[in-house]
Image (tube, grey):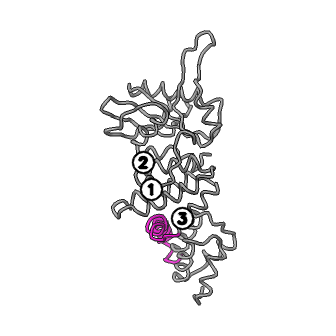
Amino acid sequence: MVSSSHEALHRIFQQEPGLFSRVARNLGVAFPPPVSASELSTDLTEIQPLERRVDTLLRMDTEDGSFVLAVESQSRPSADKPASWAYYLSHVYAKYGVPPVLLVVCPHRKTAAWAARQFDIGPRQWPSLTLRPLVLGPSDVPVIDSPDEAARDIPLTILSAALHRSDPEADAILNALAKALKGLSADDESSAGTFIELMEQGLGTTRAAELWRHLMAVDLSFFQSQTAQQLRAEGRAEGRAEGEAKGEAKALLLLLGHRGVEVGDGDRERIVGCGDPDVLDEWFKRALTAGSMAEVFAPAEESGLAE
């Protein structure tokens, strides 16, 4: 099953295609920044019942010509992958007639070292194909721990945090990113929400993910205006046919799940069984920063709200 952290390592290039030319310089390869970029279908399945999907596929048009960028997120070495990657590139070239480039993004140094090898496909005496992926690992992306530097390139900072998520520098990167995001103008609010989601995905289940949730909860205007309100709207829409309280309960459960708060069977029954929208609204507000269900429920009881 594909993890959320896997998704973030290639989705960031969908969000900001120009990031590729910036990080490629760290690998010693100069690609001009794209004048335009368009997403292509990632489905490389043929008529035969064999499904092959690349993670992200972008057509990059630059002043120096065009190429197709295939981005793969790879968490561990896999003996089958080089053959799949060679298939992706051959199929893309045959389908679009545009030179392909493979970028493999690895959150672990050991995996990055494996992926950076030259893969020869064919007999030892005469390999018919040679696969040379560009590889981005923790050693290839700088640690961005300055808020000013983070503000200059937020997508690169997200990538930096995702690749260094298990390193001691992760906390400094996340603090810098949080300050940079809070400095965005109101016009950038939609992009900020996407960046926040990508960063949470990119951190996976590491300790850094808990720090990120805390940083986003410190200034509630950010979390509340983006993720929380989006989840509330989704919950209300799903529960509208069953009444206001059902919608609030659904929204609360979505928020708790998004924040990683463990909800026991008894807690879930208590939320679903509560018919008072005011109590549910209070619980929802507490859930923005709560680290446990005890914190969600206790304040509502202390405030005198009746279930």
Q: Nearer the viewer, residue 303 or 52?
A: 303
Q: Report helix, strand or loop for mark 2.
A: helix
Q: Quadrant of residue 35?
A: top left
Give the magenta part as a residue range. Answer: 218-245
**Which residue is disc 3 drawn over?**
215
Q: Is 237 within the magenta?
A: yes
Residues tagged 2 and 1 counted as in contact (Cβ below 8 A): yes
| Amino acid type at image mark 3 | Leu
Q: Which of 243 and 19 is in front in this view?
A: 19
Residue 297 is situated, as x and y percent measured from the top left of the image, at 63, 79
- Residue at the location (57% across, 66% down)? 214
The C terminus lies in which quarter of the figure? bottom right
**Which residue is disc 1 drawn over?**
194
- Going from the N terminus, do you reach mark 2 or mark 1 first? 2
- Residue at the location (59% across, 52% down)? 169
| Amino acid type at image mark 2 | Gln
Q: Residues within 10 Å of mark 2 (few under 14, many from 20)?
A: some
With 29 as the anchor, is 78 left or right in this view? right
Q: Main secondary structure of the magenta part?
A: helix
Outermost residue toward the bottom?
304
| Amino acid type at image mark 1 | Thr
Q: In which quarter of the image is residue 92?
A: top left
Q: Residues within 10 Å of mark 3 (few under 14, many from 20)?
A: some
